[in-house]
Image (cartoon, grey):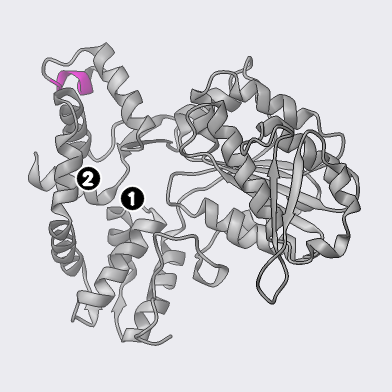
Amino acid sequence: MTENKELFYYDQVLEIEQFCNFSSEKEYLLKAIENGECTKLYGPRNFGKTSLARNIVAKIWEAKNIDKRVVVYADLYSVTDLNDLSLELTKAFTKALNSKKNILDKGLEWLKVFKNIRPAWTPSSMSDGLGEFSLTTEKSEQIINFQIILENIHHLQKSGKFEFLIIFDEFQEIHKIKRAEALLRSSLQFFSIKIPVIILGSKQHLLKDIFESPRAPFYSWGNTIEFHPIPFKEYHSYIEERFSSLKMTHSLETSIFLQTKMNRIPESINRFCSYLCKTNSEKEITIVTIENELQQFVDRSRSIYEHIFSNLSSSERKIIETISKNEKITQVLGKDFLSSLKDVSKSTVSNVVHKLLDQAILSQGIDEMNKKYFWITDPFFNYFVKHYKI
């Protein structure tokens, strides 16, 4: 490593050499998709689920038969209706097939496998001659119904021309769309051959409704992998390896303090460590260093957090402030919590907490005693609230 190279990565999907830990999850996931199994991958946002599934596991799987294997990745975070769902699947499927540089080597016969879809090939004006593959409906519409997309993935794999891996990111968002779960489950049940599917989810309260309710279409669907915080010692070693290139160091005790301050979220830890590498002049990072630098870091982005806070209602602010003050709350509808909120009814608290979970301002987890607890997702916003609003 050199000083000119980025040492900590964030705001992007990571490559395998930039990734920390989750090796057992990687091996489990690789075995599952090789066996054509379906898997749910749970974990808070910014824990590295997408990096593991899309940039590491999917690439390893695809590389074993690069000419035949196709990864269809669809991010569902912004979907609000069935048309959005179809749009994301159309884009994902088209992009996946376009990534196959040898697609013309298969000839044109495989295009006849498509049903209710009109494929087109636009020759390239460049010397590479690859051209561009595109799809429309039989009525020349640009958005193809997602059920038709999945049906054609099934037909193409059954023809023997391709092998598919389907990845749905931020899957819990379909819970807000009427009939989406039932229609999507019906399409996946249509597969008569094994096609591996990976579902990524970050909002525990929605995922529970989708997969744990006996009347839900996806009840008991697939295997489950849960992302838990990286062990303190392992992340300490990861940080130390990168600090050492700048002749910086920090103790395990300091690292535990740092990781805890960042809610043990890899993205937040990397962001703050990158900041330390660029601004700190001390060779030994201490707890005092972290406290001082964290204040400077939040101050630099204070207007962002002011904007977030200003857009909250009075009840939302009271709830956020109380959770920040206590770090974590186990019973948001318990007497102690409710009594600390003046003029906020129990029903209002329930509605507000649900809304803040949907917006990812709050996160929900399960402790060792199998009890739910809530915390402010962004550790920097939490610091801002605690030091400037309470």
Q: Are marks 1 and 2 in contact (CB under 8 Å)?
A: yes
**Residue 67 in the image: above or below residue 260:** below
- The residue under the point 54% across, 52% down is 50
Q: Which residue is mark 1?
A: 263
Q: Which residue is mark 2?
A: 382
**Quadrant that contains the C terminus:** top left
Snapshot quadrant of residue 338? top left
Residue sitting nearer the eye, 73 or 280: 73
The type of residue carrying mark 2 is: Asn
- The residue under the point 60% across, 54% down is 53
Can residue 236 be seen here? The reply is yes
Badge 1 density bin: few <14, some 14–19, many ≥20, Cα 10 Å: some
* Mark seen at residue 179: none
Snapshot quadrant of residue 63? bottom right
Label 1 vs label 2, nearer the camera: 2
Instruction: Tell me where residue 256 appears, x and y as whole percent.
Output: 33, 61
**Residue 373 in the image: above or below residue 379:** above
Q: Which residues are magenta?
A: 336-341
- The residue under the point 14% across, 25% down is 314
Tally the numbered discs.
2
